[in-house]
Every structure is written in C-alpha cells, then in structure tokens.
Image (cartoon, rainbow, N blue to C red):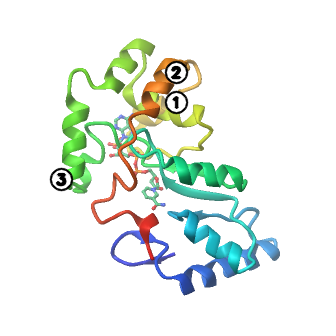
Amino acid sequence: MRATGKGDAPYDREHRLAQWRGLVELKRQGKARSIGVSNFSIEHIEELKSADLPMPAANQIELHPWSQKPALVQYLNNNGITPIAYSSLVPLSTWRIAEGQASAKTEEMKADGLQADAPFKIMATKYGVTEAQVLLRWAVQKGYPVLPKSTNGGRIRTNADIFSFSIDEPDMAAIEKMDRGDGVAWASGDPTKAP
Ligand SMILES: NC(=O)c1ccc[n+]([C@@H]2O[C@H](COP(=O)([O-])OP(=O)(O)OC[C@H]3O[C@@H](n4cnc5c(N)ncnc54)[C@H](OP(=O)(O)O)[C@@H]3O)[C@@H](O)[C@H]2O)c1
C-alpha cells in the first residue's frame, strides 16, 4: 500500500500488484512466514487471482457490529483468507475522541453510543463486563482476530480478558441486525472502495 493522504489504502491497481508481487517474493525467500493485505475489497483480491498470484493469508479490514461487511467476509471465508478486525471499538461513545477523527457520521455514532439504552451498554450490564469487552468478544465469537489499541494499561488488560464469558445466541442475532454499512470509521472515505 502507499500513503495517499486518505489513509493507507490499496489505491492504484499497478501499485497493488507490484507490492503484492514483492511480498510473494519475500515469502518465497523465507523472509516472511505469512503475507496479507489490508482494506482489500472482493474486486481487489480478484485482481490478484486474475494476475495468477497466490492468495493472501489475511485481509485486515474495519469490522465491528456497525460495519459487518457480510459479502466480503463470506468471500474471504470461501477463499481461505482470514478477516482481521480493526477499529473493533467504533460503537463506543468515546471511540478515538482525543484523536480528532470526528465526522458527521462519527458524531452521530457517538451520540447513539451515549444513549442510556444503547444496546452494548445493556449487554455489558447483562454479562458483567465492559462495552469494549462485549465488542471484542463478538469479534472473537465470529472468528475474527482483533487488534484493539489502547494507551491505558487497565484497558489493555480488560480488552484481553474476554474468555470468561460468551455472548448468547439471541444477542449475537440482535447484533447481526446492527450493520450500518462499509467504512463507518473513515471520515476520509472507505478505503475498500479504492479504484
Ligand atoms: N489497516 C488499516 O487501515 C487500519 C485502520 C485503522 C486501524 N488499524 C489498526 O487497528 C488498531 C486498532 O484500531 P483503532 O485504533 O482504529 O481502533 P480501536 O482499537 O477500535 O479503538 C482505539 C480507541 O479506543 C480506545 N479504547 C481502547 N480500549 C478501550 C476500552 N476498553 N474502553 C474505552 N476505550 C478504549 C482507545 O483510547 P485509549 O488509548 O485512551 O484507551 C482509542 O481511542 C490500530 O492500532 C491499527 O494497528 C488499521
């Protein structure tokens, strides 16, 4: 990927293929055990297939209850590519509040998360955990590796402590209906839509 000022995204077919060929070569030389991509859509991965290149081991994408990307996840599963979830904590009303990432969309999401009856607040109370733990547990139950980021030691510890409870089937089914579409976290536009 190259930096574009719109976030690190798979912009430009030629660069995508050249960079993927480079990674394939590193793997061939034994310098990388596994190679993957990030923010690739189905079309981006099909491009690799058409060029007769090996498939990535993983695709790191924005993945959380408000951006579930069912078609892309299904495609990744069918092709043996692991979806890795980033920005898992987007539905928290405090998500990246200090980082100046605000857009109309994120402001709306924060307002939703602040409601006293916000669904993740209710689930957190029900399971006796934090909202962040519910969101991370959801991802793990879906089979997604997660990489939550925190600068706070206490939160890092609780974010890792998600194996002493599980979200029940009715709550998993309720979360399934919360999808708000692609690229929810990006003020600059969804990188999987790169041409
Ligand atoms: N490939 C890509 O294009 C891409 C894009 C975005 C992110 N990523 C990767 O994914 C990682 C995580 O994504 P992210 O930073 O977007 O989002 P995230 O991990 O979902 O959220 C991080 C934010 O949540 C806060 N937080 C963490 N744990 C919390 C908790 N238990 N309770 C309340 N707030 C909590 C953090 O603040 P504190 O530090 O104050 O705890 C920070 O503001 C990044 O480090 C990056 O490696 C990749």
Q: Quadrant of residue 60?
A: bottom right
What number is the disc on residue 1? none
Q: Nearer the viewer, residue 147 or 51?
A: 51
* 1 and 3 marks in contact (CB < 8 Å): no
Residue in the image at 62% along x and 85% along y: 18
Q: Percent from the top left, x then y, of residue 111?
A: 18, 37
Check disc 3 and report its element: helix, strand or loop. Answer: helix
Return the residue at label 3: 104
> Mark 3 or mark 2, which has the lower sequence index?
3
* Disc 3 residue crowd, few under 14, some 14–19, many 20+, Cα 10 Å: few
Separation of disc 1 and disc 2 at Cα?
7 Å
Q: Report the amino acid beneath label 2.
A: Ile
* Disc 1 residue crowd, few under 14, some 14–19, many 20+, Cα 10 Å: many
Residue in the image at 54% along x and 65% along y: 40
> Mark 1 or mark 2, which has the lower sequence index?
1
Q: Percent from the top left, x then y, of residue 165?
A: 55, 18
Return the residue at label 2: 167
Q: Is residue 122 above or below residue 93?
A: above
Q: Report the amino acid beneath label 3.
A: Ala
